[in-house]
Image (cartoon, rainbow, N blue to C red):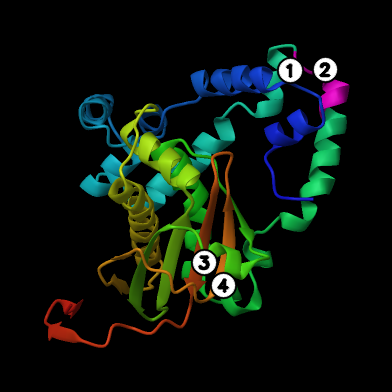
């Protein structure tokens, strides 16, 4: 057994072909409700504002979710709410396969049941986070945000599962990490192989033909990490948990803390969360807070 997506499972089971899966994914994308449209529907943004941000998105290639987060026009809680609603409204793969006539309802139900049983050992959620992180609120938020923002920012599907092989994840070449200090300090490290880093780089600029350079591959991983942790900290601020960030490190490979696999159709990634990080030793105390001195 291994962690896989439902589409991969169906192909391996001989239920559909790779071309049928691509057609179903295209249908899902065409019927996806844009975040801007959802923001107008629930009253978070006006149609005029969404038109402006959509124009900026097209002109810069910056994903809508990242754009509104950077500009501060939506709070992290509002953005999380929109991402959750978008996921709930998205046409599921099974529904798309039914709509295209590639599967019949009884066959879909049978394959779904087999798939759920096959993947049950890999399911995680807040209650299944290991004891080391069970009372560490930031860890739950980060684990929740990674797949949401990978999909929203770069169109990359990600599953976060507890890692079985800690050492193998240390070999992933494209890495970045960030440390937060405060009442619940933590260090998060994100790693990716070439396939996942390339998918992130292409998705972030909306160019499927992009051939990213080595620095761009690392930067794409760092950009996803920065947005995930930044939004997590802002959301935690609303819950009364005050944290501040040190500047990110690129190419870091400490691989300390609890390890998670990031499983995607494009490659493999890693997520390490350390709830007891060693904070940078040298710092300058200013009125505004603590800033690392490198």
Question: In the rendered structure, which disc, 1 or 3, sits on the residue that comes first in sequence?
Answer: 1
Q: Which residue is mark 2?
A: 104
Mark 1, other Cα within 10 Å: few <14 / some 14–19 / many ≥20:
some
2 or 4: tag closer to the N-terminus: 2
Q: Relative to 216, is 184 above or below? A: below
- Mark 1–mark 3 Cα distance, whole angstroms, equals 41 Å
Within 10 Å of disc 3 (Cα), the crowding (few <14, some 14-19, many 20+) is some
Instruction: Say which of marks 4 and 3 sits in front.
Output: 3
Q: Position of residue 61 (x, y in %)?
A: 27, 32
Kind of element beneath mark 4: strand
Q: Is residue 215 visible?
A: yes
The residue at the point 64 percent across, 64 percent down is: 163
Question: Mark 2 to mark 4: distance in Å?
Answer: 41 Å
**Which mark sits nearer the N-terminus, 4 or 3?**
3
Q: Is there a contact, CB below 8 Å, between mark 1 and mark 3?
A: no
Q: Are marks 2 and 1 in contact (CB under 8 Å)?
A: yes
Residue 281 left/right relative to 6:
left
Q: Quadrant of the C terminus?
A: bottom left
Query: Eyeballing the image, is 248 above or below 28?
Result: below
Q: On residue 258, which mark appears? A: 4
Q: Which residue is mark 1?
A: 98
Q: Which residues are magenta?
A: 102-108
Direction from residue 89 to residue 5 in the image, left or right: right
Which callout, 1 or 4, points at the residue further toward the start of the chain?
A: 1
For the residue carrying disc 4, how many other residues have a C-alpha within 10 Å: few (<14), some (14-19), or many (20+)? Answer: some
Which circle marks residue 170 in the picture?
Answer: 3
Query: 28 above or below 226?
Result: above
Residue 54, image quadrant? top left
Q: Is residue 78 magenta?
A: no
């Amino acid at each position: 057994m291994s962690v896989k997506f439902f589409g991969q499972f169906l192909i391996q089971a001989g239920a559909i072909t790779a071309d049928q899966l691509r057609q179903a994914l295209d249908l899902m994308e065409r019927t996806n409700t844009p975040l801007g449209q959802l923001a107008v529907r629930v009253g978070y943004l006006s149609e005029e504002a969404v038109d402006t941000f959509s124009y900026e998105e097209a002109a810069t290639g910056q994903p809508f979710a990242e754009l509104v987060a950077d500009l501060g026009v939506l709070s992290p809680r509002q953005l999380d709410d929109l991402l959750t609603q978008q996921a709930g409204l998205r046409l599921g793969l099974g529904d798309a396969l039914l709509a295209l006539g590639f599967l019949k309802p009884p066959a879909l139900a049978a394959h779904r049941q087999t798939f759920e049983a096959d993947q049950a050992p890999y399911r995680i959620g807040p209650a299944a986070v290991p004891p080391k992180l069970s009372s560490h609120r930031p860890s739950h938020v980060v684990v929740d945000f990674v797949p949401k923002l990978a999909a929203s920012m770069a169109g990359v599907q990600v599953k976060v599962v507890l890692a079985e092989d800690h050492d193998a994840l240390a070999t992933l070449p494209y890495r970045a990490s960030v440390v937060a200090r405060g009442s619940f300090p933590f260090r998060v490290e994100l790693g990716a192989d070439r396939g996942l880093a390339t998918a992130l780089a292409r998705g972030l600029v909306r160019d499927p033909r992009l051939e990213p350079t080595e620095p761009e591959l690392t930067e794409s991983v760092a950009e996803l990490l920065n947005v995930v942790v930044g939004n997590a900290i802002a959301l935690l601020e609303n819950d009364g948990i005050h944290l501040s960030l040190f500047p990110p490190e690129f190419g870091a490979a400490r691989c300390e803390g609890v390890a998670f696999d990031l499983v995607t159709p494009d490659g493999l990634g890693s997520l390490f969360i350390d709830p007891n990080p060693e904070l940078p030793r040298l710092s300058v105390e200013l009125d505004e807070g603590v800033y690392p001195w490198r």
